[in-house]
Amino acid sequence: MTEPSRRGLIAGAAAFGATLPLTGALSTFSPDSAQAAVQPMGQQVPSIYRYKVGSIELTAVNDGVRTFPLAENFVKNAKPDEINAALEAGFMPKGQITAQFNPLLLNTGGKLVLIDTGNGPQAGTATVGRLNANLGWAGVKPADVDIVIISHFHGDHINGLRTDDGVLAFPNAEILVPAPEWAFWMDEGEMSRAPEGMKPAFANVRRVFKDLDSRVRRYEWDKEIAPGITTVAAPGHTPGHTAYVVASGKDKLFVQSDVTNTPVLFVPHPDWQVQYDMDGAKAAETRRKVYDMLAAERLQLTGYHYPFPATGFIAKDGSGYRFVPAMWNPAL
Amino acid sequence: MTEPSRRGLIAGAAAFGATLPLTGALSTFSPDSAQAAVQPMGQQVPSIYRYKVGSIELTAVNDGVRTFPLAENFVKNAKPDEINAALEAGFMPKGQITAQFNPLLLNTGGKLVLIDTGNGPQAGTATVGRLNANLGWAGVKPADVDIVIISHFHGDHINGLRTDDGVLAFPNAEILVPAPEWAFWMDEGEMSRAPEGMKPAFANVRRVFKDLDSRVRRYEWDKEIAPGITTVAAPGHTPGHTAYVVASGKDKLFVQSDVTNTPVLFVPHPDWQVQYDMDGAKAAETRRKVYDMLAAERLQLTGYHYPFPATGFIAKDGSGYRFVPAMWNPAL
């Protein structure tokens, strides 16, 4: 991304800038004359998208994207050549992984609910940590959020609970977390027995949830924990990893959380285990079970690491599955 | 779509309203208190998306979407059961067709170029005719457009050349049209020999291009007609139907225009002929030739009737092809 020009910033901001309200930026809006060449905008539109499940209005609110070199151990049980072949079949560059992060906002009529909170505060040039800016573009202030639901305790899902001052990013929200996830990460024995590479994750969980015991509600599986939102056991990726069914009227949506990581690899190859799957075999078993159900029921899915707007359908395809994106609806 | 609430209109408008500048709407922006339940927004975000081909900045600017019952003759050479099977495979409802319309804006650095102009002025409740509102959200005024390129003379591509007052919608733009298309539709003999069902299309072409002879530049195939934009012969859909290659540096994009109609049907079944293909056999031949080339070269495509953001790749798949959407890039 190059530095946007002043006009790019203003005209860009007029449609898609950083925060609400925009009166300041807009009062300086001054169209170029028709004679001058119009400069490129140099910045993307905000990545937010609305859709409906019955009377529930959902908004995919992107937190950003990360691209990093393909590490030898990124997939525990596939070789770089196999991974590169899958990337090529998906028309993605070889030798690198692009991961997106898509928290989900739900307006249930009575409650404004956010599922997962993104990567949290970042340095200025980061390509993630965009959740709050994009919520602003969706017309939502952090103080509006009534309930935050956390699917599991990896940093890219929980770090957005705190601002860069360390205070609560959603000051009026009840925080709902999976009971088995809380039990695992808060257990002193688990922490002391964890391999060295896992210690920072334990420390991060304790930083984020410090002094929040009384504020956090721990939820069980197979329960409706907010209007229309029912928890589904999806362990393996982490011990308490949770998916959801959103239901309203006769409509349903499956919120898969991290049942797969980036779909270009793990939808056609569901037995592949990403390095972040803490119990790889169980994660793969959960993945097969969930995806067989999605394919059989033709149930619409949204996935946290799916490319924005992160929603579509799963079909069986050979020994794996195929993702069919839902058609973008320009009219809601 | 239900009537949006006042708050929905204001907060929606703050992010994604109808026209620029927004100062009027925004000066009345008044956030709800945290206690009140936040109302659903009730309207979609603007359907615009930016991407780059070398140094050229492209913007997919959606003109809307139409859904209509599947007519017996929608595909000339396929039965309703076969069409419904293709819709089902694409997770689309059976018995109806959903068509999108995606003009393409290109900023070549020196010139602002628009390829095709959408369905034009509509009554208030129409779900098409959104081009100018979405151009506004992209930071572009009609007077900014330097060049309008027309791919062919069907109404959903040319009607946006005129406002509802009948004046030119892009008052400063040179208008570039395919020479063989102009020759066909302006020919008195062709009009008099045309079947009755085609007469309104001839009349519409003459309405849109009335008194524009001296303003319209007629282009040939295999020529660079604007910076980085080269015409490609794609006859069959209409006699002068034209596609384009956009090239900058080592990047390339194929702009297919109507080489296929809605991809859920014609990508897996390229020999199917939509009722709008004027020479169905030639259109199918062009489709095979273009899609074989796209698959062999792994060349990125954009298609006017593809679902927004209307860009991705073509792979061979059985006796037809498969569309792989390009990953949405949140960071440009």
Image: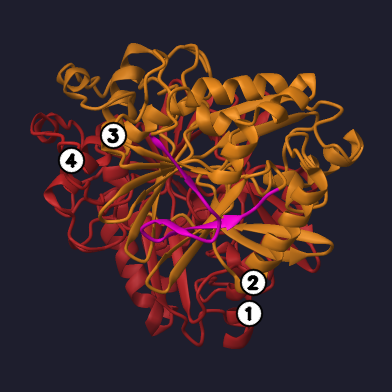
Chain colours: A orange, B red
Task: Between label 2 and label 4, give the one nearer the viewer.
Answer: 4
- In which chain is the residue bearing label 3? A
Q: Does A226 lie within the magenta span?
A: yes
Q: Calculate the distance from the C-alpha at mark 1 to the C-alpha at mark 3.
A: 49 Å
User: Do callouts 2 and 3 point to residues on the same chain?
Assistant: no
Residue drawn where x is 22% and y is 46% of the image: B38
Considering depth in this image, is A264 or A160 the residue closer to the camera?
A160
In the rendered structure, the residue with mark 2 lies on which chain?
B
Question: Which chain is indicated by disc 4?
Answer: B
Residue A194 is at least partly visible in this image? no
Residue type for callout 2: Ala
Which residue position holds label 3? A172
Precedes in sequence: disc 4 or disc 1: 4
* Disc 1 target residue: B85
Residue at numbered disc 4 = B35
Q: Which residues are magenta?
A: A215-235
Image-quadrant location for residue B187: bottom left
Q: Which mark is residue B89?
A: 2
Residue type for callout 1: Ala
Q: Tell me, yes or no, whether the two marked residues, 2 and 1, touch with CB atoms within 8 Å.
A: yes
**Disc 1 element:** helix
**Residue B67: where, in percent of width, then height?**
39, 70
Residue A152 in the image, given as x and y percentages of width and height: 58, 40
What secondary structure is found at the residue carrying circle 4? Answer: loop
Residue extending farthest front: A189
